[in-house]
Amino acid sequence: MADKDLNALFLDTLKDIYYAEKQIYKALPKMAKAANSDQLRAAFEKHHDETEGQIVRLEQIFELLEKPARGKKCDAIEGILDEGTEIMDEYKGEPALDAGLLAAAQAVEHYEISRYGTLKSWATKLGMKDAVKLLDQTLAEEKKTDDALTKLAETAVNAEAA
């Protein structure tokens, strides 16, 4: 059995976010379809495309580590995505649907930002320069998406829900 050191924790967390990204990739088209706002739908579609690239970058990190790209079930993302599904079911056809979808999407973003920030910090500590670059690229995308969702909420979606 391998030592439970920072390398092991990094790999374990990498598997976690890999699983999470694959689940997010599957959920985004459903969220886009459910959205009433064209702007929100477009944001979900854009993030779907970005998520595909993020999965590829994670696979590149697995290659750098000479490990197979395998996910590990992530209960946290399952719960966050389940909440999004509940919102879609409970608020279908209601004015607050888009506000709820947007809030659910931001919960996903905040989870991703937390995970990528942690992985980047650990990769830096472990001297994984190539992994740091890949993680930093994804972290920047996630922060940009979160900022765009905040602006969309403040300028349109929340007012339409009220």
Image (spheres, helix red, strand yellow):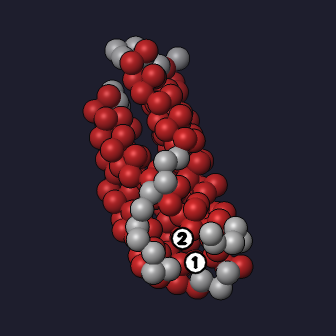
* Residue that label 2 marks: 135
Q: Quadrant of the N terminus?
A: bottom right
Of residues 19 and 155, the one drawn nearer to the viewer in this rendering: 19
Image: 95 above or below 157: above
User: Residue flagged by tag 2: what amino acid is it?
Assistant: Leu
Of residues 161 and 44, the one drawn nearer to the viewer in this rendering: 44
Residue found at x 44% / y 57%: 71
Residue found at x 60% / y 47%: 110
Residue found at x 65% / y 85%: 127
Q: Residues within 10 Å of mark 2 (few under 14, many from 20)?
A: many
Q: In the displayed structure, does residue 113 sit left or right of residue 104? A: right
**Residues marked 2 and 1 touching at CB (< 8 Å):** yes
Looking at the rendered structure, the secondary structure element under dot 1 is helix
Looking at the rendered structure, the secondary structure element under dot 2 is helix
Of residues 51 and 59, the one drawn nearer to the viewer in this rendering: 59
Residue lying farthest to the front in this orientation: 1
| Label number found at residue 132 | 1
Q: Residues within 10 Å of mark 1 (few under 14, many from 20)?
A: many
User: Residue flagged by tag 1: what amino acid is it?
Assistant: Val
Residue 131, can we see it?
Answer: yes
Q: In the displayed structure, does residue 2 sit left or right of residue 100? A: right
Instruction: Give the percent coordinates (x, y) of residue 140.
Output: 54, 65
